[in-house]
Image (cartoon, coloured by chain):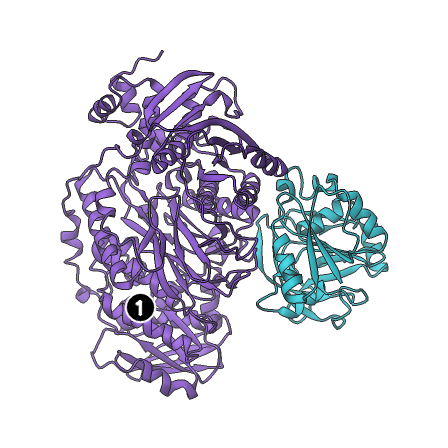
Amino acid sequence: MIVITPEIIKEHGLTPDEYEKIKTLLHREPNITELGMFSVLWSEHCAYKNSKPLLKKYPTTGKYVLQGPGENAGIVDIGDGVAISFKIESHNHPSAIEPYQGAATGAGGIIRDIFAMGARPIACLDSLRFGDIAKNRQNRHLFEYVVKGIGDYGNCVGIPTVAGEVYFEDTYDNNCLVNAMCVGVVQSGDKVISPLYGPIVKGVAKGEGNLVVYIGASTGRDGIHGATFASVELTAESTEKKSSVQVGDPFQEKLLIEACLELLKTDCVVGLGDMGAAGLTSSLSEMATRGNHGMEIDVALVPQREKNMTPYEIMLSESQERMVVIVEKGKEQKVFDILKKWDLHAIVIGKVTTNNQFTVLNNGVVAADIPASALTDDAPIYNRPYTKPAYLELTSKYSISALPDINNGNEPLLTLLGTPNIASKKWVYEQYDYMVQTNTEVIPGRADAAVLTIKDTNKRIAVKTDGNGRYTYLNPRVGGQICVAEASRNVACTGAVPIAMTNCLNFGNPEKPESFWQLKEAVEGMAEACVTLNTPVISGNVSLYNESEIGSIFPTPVVGILGIFEGDYKSMTMSFKAAEDIIYLVGETFNELGGSEYLKTIHQTISGEPPKIDLSLEKELQALTIAAIKGGLVNSAHDLADGGLAVALAECTFEHKLGAEINLSNELALRNDCILFGESQSRILFSVAKDKQEAFEKIFKNFKFQNIGKVTSNNHLKIKVSDKILVDLSGHKMDDNYMNSIQKIMGQI
Amino acid sequence: MNYGVIVFPGSNCDSDCFHAIRDEIKADIQYIWHEESSLPSKLDVLIIPGGFSYGDYLRCGAIAKFAKIMPEIVRFANGGGYVIGICNGFQILTESGLLPGALLRNQFQKFICKDIFLKVTNTESSFTRDFQKQQVITVPIAHGEGRYFIDKQGLQSLEDNGQIAFQYVSKSGDLTSEDNPNGSLKSIAGIFNKNKNVLGMMPHPERCNFVNRESLKILKIS
């Protein structure tokens, strides 16, 4: 019998007050197994104890929303019996310590969340952030193995990785960010739309006497305390926590997907849940709470891959590729048969009970006995104090007026095209099978978002993840707004209507008032953007405590946006298609360089205010863009983002080896660097055939737009501002910098 | 034509092949589970799809060759039935001895997914008859172990019997090392058996449903 000491409580990441609360809820002292169970479920990762009050600010309902936050993943109904389930989740700390397995199991975990809803996973996306890879071998190592981990897992399990983003910034040294999103298709109602997709199932346990069936891989000691680990800062000792990192087996996952979807075609499943963070403890207690029932299981029945495992270890293990099914009593044979076909474990480990008690036995002897809701609903919630960080005083005062303007943009443009943040991410996505399932209509690198068809339906969707840690660092509220607006704009640039969002909040220690202020401001900014842009939040994840010995990371919210095509019009890509097409810049440019890639790369400065954004203007821009694409009026659409106009123009020329001749008027007498490389928001570059010009201009008549030049057949980019040549570069030179830069850097490994 | 596609645990292109045949080629196709002890009686073409059969543990395709259905596949092929192995399916065909040679780890170690150019080296087969000799087509690859290798004698035999079906080439049809994505011997991307009723290839013609649709013709037996 282990005596619970203050040291043990502290090691479990619980405060003395929290321990007192546990005693009150139990009316006694917990034993060590119970303490372990509380510690994982009351961690930030599972309980959102620091972020819950903020997350309430998000809009979570709307005409498409079938399932908002609170389940394994959210679901939107896109009509005709088809629904989409999606969610993003972080696996930052495990990836920082063991990049290959950390990233692989991150992908595995989010995929399970999706098929736990009955959906067939059809796409993955990844938002990755590392320290500077040009500077540092450790960063290259992390980058190399995170990408390999995601690739090996997704490729084997047969889910294409179709889009995402990768950024490099010193702030992510020693604390890389690995956020993985998965998208799945599920029937919205009873009507069977295809044998490929399941009906919606929820993570509930109900019906007295129904059986708790454990399926999938056996339980080992890996990942014990992963959830608690995700909720503390990284230190040198963290590397000793290597046992907290789980090991993935994508083959098992593939079998689980097929077996679960087959199970859902029978009438025996009451509920389905993934054993993710906090393993058996969280999946079972959450299912019991949601179903308003209790549960009794015996851990001795759990398949174990190691000898002499204690109830504590079994309940807390985060071994991968495990699921729990609640099966209607008497129908268990069907489950056994299907799981046998897929060569997977299916073992009854307990039953659903009427009271709310979660009882864990070990060979019939009680090892833990806790009200299920004490673990879930009674977790402490903190309203943390917050203070505006002092650094903002300095950064917000920064002015570009002391910066010399440029008269020639050639060198800065070539440099920017080769900087890993802007350069082609081909080195990454060519390691991912982005085509398996043959739904990927628009592949990586071709458009601002990926476009997917949905088999056996007439539906198409567009998906994209986006984030901007630098903007959010310089102004969390505006940074939060921009990150939603930009992901949404990316989706709109393919012609799809953005309808819902998932998000991953990667922030520092919420117990520090400065970090909490960043979180609060960013979430409020994101919530405002979601309301205006009509993209309710249906799922997400919070990753706090992203701090290492060098301090907190830039606060980095990442959002994933889902868009739908309303009709069978052609999806749009970013490349110029035909010489002589007219190039339009829609939106307004200002003297804005704060937080830009230009300021960082060319002037080694991360400062200033990020570009301002008007959310209602953004909403209108996106609606008009979709209308123009729907009407077949444009040949390309590309959002202006990192590196501004000059980079966007170059990017439009690569695929078809075309060129552009641009002549910008400069009535506002803006700075040349701001015109070429500024990142003013709500701007999109279009190319339009001459016979569509009139109709195009009519659509944007109430909007700021400028006819800035034309597409040329020679592979060359010429940009004049008020008739003065600022950029004059061959496509070949730009292409080489853009396409091969990351590969060259990674070649140094 | 009646098609069948084998489903091993870990196959992940089975459904893609199913849809390519049903929706693009417009022929009948059915799934065949690896534990079946016989093939459907009405069967003309059998596809062994890509993926990671049995997790590709040990070696790609090495465990699949012991599957219950495997002797039936061998019998079907030896009886003149058409068999197409794509990617992992190609690996299974070489492991099981229906095709010569082996597929090794890509030269640069990494998994590669991208469109590549293929030369149709031999058009005298039911898989390639619809193409012009030396025609360059575009087909995507997605594999980590696709470097074709065979010993000197084996290569000679392949060449003598016209068994080289496809080779990786440049856009203009030249065999260059830059256009050989995985370091395959002689840039070999696909081969036939001697009778040319069995085809194994690393590229995925079933993925040409959006672009390069002409390459789907490889799956259409004529």
Indicate the chain on which mark 1 is placed.
A
Q: Nearer the viewer, residue A349 or A494?
A: A349
Which image quadrant for residue A208? top left
- Which chain did the renderer colour cyan? B
Instruction: Look at the image and tell me whether residue A660 can be seen.
Output: yes
Is residue B9 toward the left or the right of residue A488 in the image? right
Residue A497 x %, y %: 37, 66
Task: Name the residue that disc number 1 marks.
Answer: A677
Judged left or right of residue B49, residue A86 is left
Q: Amino acid at mark 1?
A: Phe
Give x and y (percent) for residue A333: 58, 33
Please state, as top left, top right, bottom left or bottom right, where the C terminus of chain B lies in the image: bottom right
Residue A720 is situated, as x and y percent measured from the top left of the image, at 33, 80
Chain displayed in purple:
A
In this rendering, does residue A606 appear at all? no
Q: How many marks?
A: 1
